[in-house]
Amino acid sequence: MKNIKIKSKFLNPLIDTLQPYTPGQQAFQHPTCKLNTNENPWGPSPGVKKAIIDYIQDDGDNLKLYPESNSDRLRKKLATKNKIKEENVFVGNGSDEVLALSFLTFFSGRGNLCFPDVTYSFYPSLAKLFEIPCEILETSKNFKINLNDISKNTSSVIFPNPNAITGLGLKKNYIEKYLTLHPDVFFIIDEAYVDFGAETCLPLINHYKNVLIIQTFSKSRSLAGLRIGTCYGDPDLINALNATKNSFNSYPVDRIASIAAIASIDDQKWHLDHINKIIINRNYLTNKLEELGFKVLKSEGNFIFVTHKNVKAKELYDFLYENKIVVRYFSSKKIENWLRITIGTKSECDLVISNIKKKLSEI
Ligand SMILES: *Cc1c(COP(=O)(O)O)cnc(C)c1O
């Protein structure tokens, strides 16, 4: 991450100090096996596609109207599905937007924010934007998050569960113990990958006023292109988020996205079947790479984090890239010899395996 340098005399001085998040590459010149940004290898369910087509055909003219400001129908659906109240639910334009609104509402102006050294790199970018001082929580040599290492000076904590980049998850009981011990610390748990096998902390919102749970339709529900993020918490917290939202963008979720999200929830069987396929492929790719001498962290996400003692991660990344397979390489010190590989279809996993075998046979 670099500070941006923009040349204009009309800048807010803060803008010159920003450290914007670098999104994973999206467009490629040639057809590529795209395993770099943890998207789903399958498109959304047939029910989702049909709902969008039906909507355009039957109600397309309604696109001239603004959407529901508070996404009431989608919130109702999410509340029923999760056995909570609508007042516990907030919806935004992708969870990145929900994160931004939450940072502004609960972290900004309230002291230090703590997050792990190896984590979603959007957090430091947002902290910079909202001028929130940060504290880094060092993970162990094996990338484990130990909440007891959070310093006494911390006002707020955020981490993904399971953690982005590593795929390692924490148990609900373990997190709850910490929430109980620190009622004055505000927690956001980013559950972008929770559907792939980790334990959700959602039930905690009924008992604690110092925790928000953020989820997304981008990963397990194959809707990264429609931008739908969700958030769960005590009604007072949700009201506060609404106040921030309505001071910034009153209509964050468009009509088509709402329709598609509701249809996605209705297609529960399709959703679970496809999560299962990813878990099967994750186990398959993990086993094959371990057989080839890789160390693979035990992932609860739709990706694995791997390292090999005989080949440098960057060299392997470049080799795969030349062979039209794109994975994710992070240059920061602690993880410079690791690669993150999104779990794709079985044939995409096989393509990764055969290319890695080729590289290993050359050294
Ligand atoms: C992908 C991801 C997000 C962003 O999700 P969107 O809903 O697509 O904005 C948020 N947090 C983590 C940890 C992610 O990996």
Image: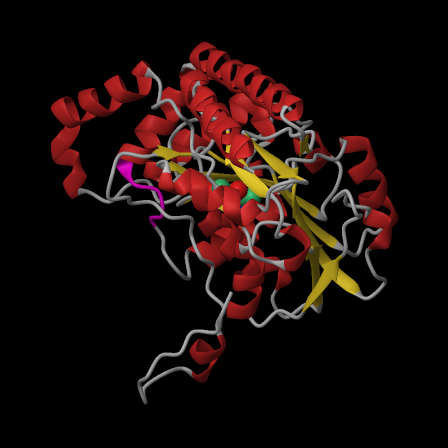
Q: Is residue 21 visible?
A: yes
Q: What residue is drawn where x is 62% and y is 25%?
A: 292
In front of the other: 56 or 72: 56
Q: Is residue 112 left or right of residue 177?
A: left
**As drawn, 20 above or below 76:** below
Q: Position of residue 43 (x, y in %)?
A: 34, 23
Q: Position of residue 293 (x, y in %)?
A: 67, 29
Q: Main secondary structure of the magenta part?
A: loop
Find residue 94 and report its image quarter.
Answer: top left
**As drawn, 38 above or below 145:** above
Q: Is residue 253 left or right of residue 50?
A: right
**As drawn, 100 above or below 212:** below
Find residue 196 and report its image quarter.
Answer: top right
Q: What residue is drawn where x is 27% and y is 36%?
A: 255
Q: Is residue 132 magenta?
A: no
Q: How is the image coloured?
A: secondary structure
Q: Is residue 91 visible?
A: no
Find residue 57 and report its image quarter.
Answer: top left
Q: Position of residue 239 (x, y in %)?
A: 54, 49
Q: Is residue 167 left or right of residue 69?
A: right
Q: Is residue 60 left or right of residue 357?
A: left
In front of the other: 235 or 363: 363
Q: Which residues are magenta?
A: 251-255
Q: What residue is drawn where x is 50% and y is 38%?
A: 230
Q: How many numbered dots are placed on residues in this image?
A: 0
**As drawn, 178 above or below 263:** below
Q: Position of residue 151 (x, y in %)?
A: 83, 61
